[in-house]
Image (spheres, helix red, strand yellow):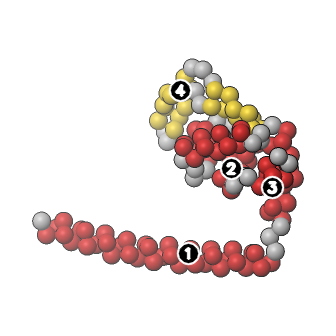
């Protein structure tokens, strides 16, 4: 499989995990706390990225103690990952090329999509507020 074919298999979530690893968040718990990805999503990304040769994953032995949301928690040591030379190549070359390859039309499409999503969120907020009031009214009638 050529380098381009490997790089084309990388999704946005995978790229986010690669950037986290590059910046030092190299275990599953650190990545889930610094992104919106769930534990299972990061695990999937780890398997996929290791399979295509962009990272190496190592399972640590023992327990780890961390402060999460102000509470000290002890849990099994998470899997740690590091970039392979191919993973570094992806982040240095391909990742940036992809970001720079958006045409003006692509940017306009993205801006339109963001505006649509903002409108959707506002509609959902309004609908939720109506629902919340209805629930409160029913509860107060009981």
Figure quadrant of the C terminus? bottom left
Secondary structure beneath dot 3 equals helix
What residue lies at 73% left-to-right and 52% top-to-bottom? 10
Badge 3 vs badge 4, beta-carbon distance below 8 Å: no
The total number of labels drawn is 4
Q: Earlier in the sequence, mark 1 or mark 2?
A: 2
Mark 1, Cα crowd under 10 Å, few <14 / some 14-19 / many 20+, is few
Badge 2 vs badge 3, beta-carbon distance below 8 Å: no
What residue lies at 58% left-to-right and 27% top-to-bottom? 77
Q: Is residue 84 visible?
A: yes
Residue 76 numbered mark, or none: 4
Q: Is residue 99 above or below residue 70?
A: below
Residue 14 numbered mark, or none: 2
In this rendering, would 94 be left or right of 127? right
Kindly give the residue lying farthest to the front in the view shown. 1
Badge 4 vs badge 2, beta-carbon distance below 8 Å: no
What residue lies at 68% left-to-right and 28% top-to-bottom? 58
What residue lies at 58% left-to-right and 38% top-to-bottom? 29
């Amino acid at each position: 499989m050529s380098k381009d074919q490997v790089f084309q298999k990388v999704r946005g979530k995978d790229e986010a995990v690669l950037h986290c690893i590059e910046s030092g968040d190299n275990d599953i718990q650190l990545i889930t706390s610094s992104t919106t990805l769930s534990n299972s999503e990061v695990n999937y990304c780890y398997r996929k990225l290791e399979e295509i040769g962009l990272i190496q994953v190592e399972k640590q032995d023992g327990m780890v103690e961390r402060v999460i949301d102000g509470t000290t928690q002890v849990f099994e040591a998470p899997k740690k990952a590091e970039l392979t030379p191919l993973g570094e190549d992806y982040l240095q070359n391909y990742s940036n090329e992809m970001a720079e390859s958006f045409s003006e039309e692509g940017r306009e499409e993205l801006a339109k999509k963001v505006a649509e999503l903002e409108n959707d969120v506002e509609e959902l907020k309004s609908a939720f507020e109506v629902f919340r009031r209805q629930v409160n009214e029913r509860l107060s009638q009981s």
